[in-house]
Every structure is written in C-alpha cells, then in structure tokens.
Image: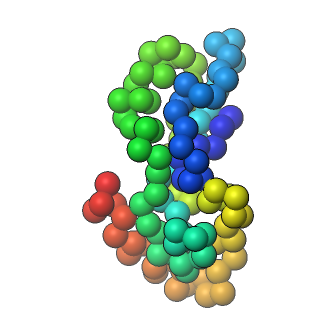
C-alpha cells in the first residue's frame, strides 16, 4: 500500500516498486485541509495533487499491473516534511460545515 498524491513530493506511479504477485493499493489524495505551508484550515479543503497522477496515468499503470487498486481520499498525513494535524478540530460542527462546503470540486 502506498499513500500518494497530496504529499507535496513529485512522483509517478512507476516510481513505486510493485509486485505482480500480490494486490497493491494506491491511496490517492486530491485535496487537503491545509494551506501551502501545512497549517490547518478548519475543514476548508483545497485542491492539492501531483500533476503526473492523472486518470491516464492510472489507466497506464493498471494496464501494466492489473493487480493495482486505487482509493481516492481527502487530506493526508503530511505535506512535504510537515505532519498535518487536521484530524482534531476545535469545533467538529464547524469543521464538517466547512468541509462540506469546500469549493475544491469546482476546480478539478
């Protein structure tokens, strides 16, 4: 399993070692609850992904490795070297309201 996408590190699927003999899962993140410095934004998600991780790249790696699976996720553990701490909001109701009204989907 490999978390990939919103870490701030340029990468391609082919950079990750994959064995054809086992199922392999990519957890692909596309938005984070942090600004570009990694500061939490209280549920206001922003689009953030590596430009090389496209639908075409997913199709290509699945052609080479049919055992590869993908899971789309929000946020992540880190942004570059900074660990994110979005998972403990002061006001959960405000966080949920902000998260559900984030406009990142319009920018995809």
Q: Residue 80, how many percent across, how many down? A: 64, 56
Q: Residue 45, how many percent across, how many down? A: 47, 69
Quadrant assignment, res 57: top left
Q: Residue at x 44, y 30 (%)?
A: 58
The residue furthest left is 106
Q: Give the left or right position of residue 73, taking residue 86 as reference.
A: left
Front residue of 93 and 87: 87
Q: Image quadrant for the N terminus?
A: top right
Q: Give the left or right position of residue 58, taking residue 108 as reference.
A: right
Q: Residue at x 47, y 75 (%)?
A: 44
Q: Residue 60, how many percent across, how many down? A: 42, 21
Q: Is residue 84 above or below residue 19?
A: below
Q: Residue at x 52, y 33 (%)?
A: 12
Q: Image quadrant for the C terminus?
A: bottom left
Q: Is residue 10 above or below residue 90?
A: above
* Colour treatment of the image: rainbow
């Amino acid at each position: 399993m490999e978390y990939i996408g919103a870490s701030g590190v340029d990468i391609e699927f082919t950079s990750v070692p994959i064995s054809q003999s086992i199922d392999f899962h990519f957890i692909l993140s596309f938005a984070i609850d942090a600004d570009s410095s990694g500061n939490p934004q209280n549920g206001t998600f922003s689009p953030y992904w590596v430009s090389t991780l496209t639908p075409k790249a997913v199709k290509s790696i699945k052609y080479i490795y049919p055992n590869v699976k993908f899971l789309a996720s929000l946020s992540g553990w880190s942004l570059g070297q900074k660990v994110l701490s979005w998972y403990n909001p002061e006001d959960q109701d405000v966080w949920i309201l902000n998260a559900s009204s984030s406009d990142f989907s319009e920018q995809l």
